[in-house]
Image: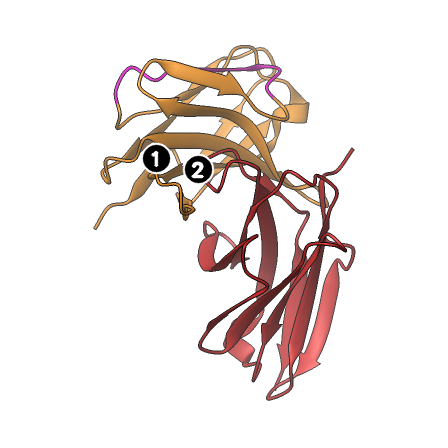
Amino acid sequence: DQQVKQNSPSLSVQEGRISILNCDYTNSMFDYFLWYKKYPAEGPTFLISISSIKDKNEDGRFTVFLNKSAKHLSLHIVPSQPGDSAVYFCAASANSGTYKYIFGTGTRLKVLA
Amino acid sequence: NAGVTQTPKFQVLKTGQSMTLQCAQDMNHEYMSWYRQDPGMGLRLIHYSVGAGITDQGEVPNGYNVSRSTTEDFPLRLLSAAPSQTSVYFCASSIGSSISGNTIYFGEGSWLTVV
């Protein structure tokens, strides 16, 4: 049973527009969430995080929204750039982010120039 | 600025062979973990450690062994390699002790093929 789901395997967006990547989770004990970006042949790199005590966190072009009642989070990238083309993973932890993260299956974002 | 270092980067094994993937971090992180990435499956947790001498199983531990004798090192052993273990393996670490949430830092990956 997959506890963290990214139901869109891929997404294409025009440069300059908004990219919205979605993530759903089933475990109500999850209280800390991360987003990672991964380029081919590289390790995942951290993008942004959010704690369950918040519903929004912003960092430059990246904003993560958390809807606890729906067990849903989303990553917004505005404006999207060709360099944002990568696979994006969301991850969740039930230990205030201390350890043991469960990752989603990833969404491949392609930003078209 | 080493961070998390994994070796080897590429390896081909024959079925039944054993090998160890090495992982070292120089950030004095308490928490270390191993993930495997397979197409359509995302990153799945194999084993993790919350400190030297302490390890526990993740989502997909079968066929793998770990130990944590020092804070810096967390090797992953394949006891008898099987084609199903063909994958990309990522080692990761984080501070682990903060109650405010932790960022996980990943190594660059080890590509393993079992034939």
Q: Residue at x 32, y 41 (%)?
A: B4
What is the three-letter code of the residue carrying label 2?
Thr
Q: Which mark is residue A113?
A: none
Residue position marked by numbered label 1 in the rendering: B97
Instruction: Say if mark 1 contacts mark 2, CB within 8 Å.
Output: yes
Colour used to depict chain B in the structure image: orange
Which SS does the magenta portion mostly show? Answer: loop
Residue furthest to the front: A53
Do marks 1 and 2 both belong to one polypeptide chain?
Answer: no
For label 1, the SS is loop
How many neighbours does mark 1 have within 10 angstroms: few (below 14), some (14-19), or many (20 or more)? Answer: some
Q: Residue at x 73, y 52 (%)?
A: A71
Q: Vertical placement of A91 versus A84: above or below?
A: above
Report the front residue among B48 and A54.
A54
Q: Residue at x 68, y 72 (%)?
A: A20
Q: Position of residue A33 (x, y in %)?
A: 55, 51
Give SS at disc 2.
loop
**Place of residue A35 in the rendered image (x, y in percent of width and height, measured from the top left):** 54, 57
Residue drawn at x 52%, y 72% is A62
Amino acid at circle 1 = Ser
User: What's the CA distance linking mark 1 and mark 2?
Assistant: 6 Å
Residue stretch rendered in magenta on the structure:
B61-70
Q: Is residue A99 visible?
A: yes
- Label 1 marks a residue whose chain is B
User: Along the line of sight, which residue is nearer the eye, B16 or B74?
Assistant: B74
The residue indicated by pointer 2 is A98
Q: Tell me, what hue is chain A?
A: red
Residue B27 appears left or right of A93: left
Residue A17 x, y percent position in the rendering: 64, 86
The picture places residue B77, in percent across and down from the top left corner, at 46, 17
Q: Nearer the viewer, residue B22 or A66?
A: A66
Q: Is residue B43 magenta?
A: no
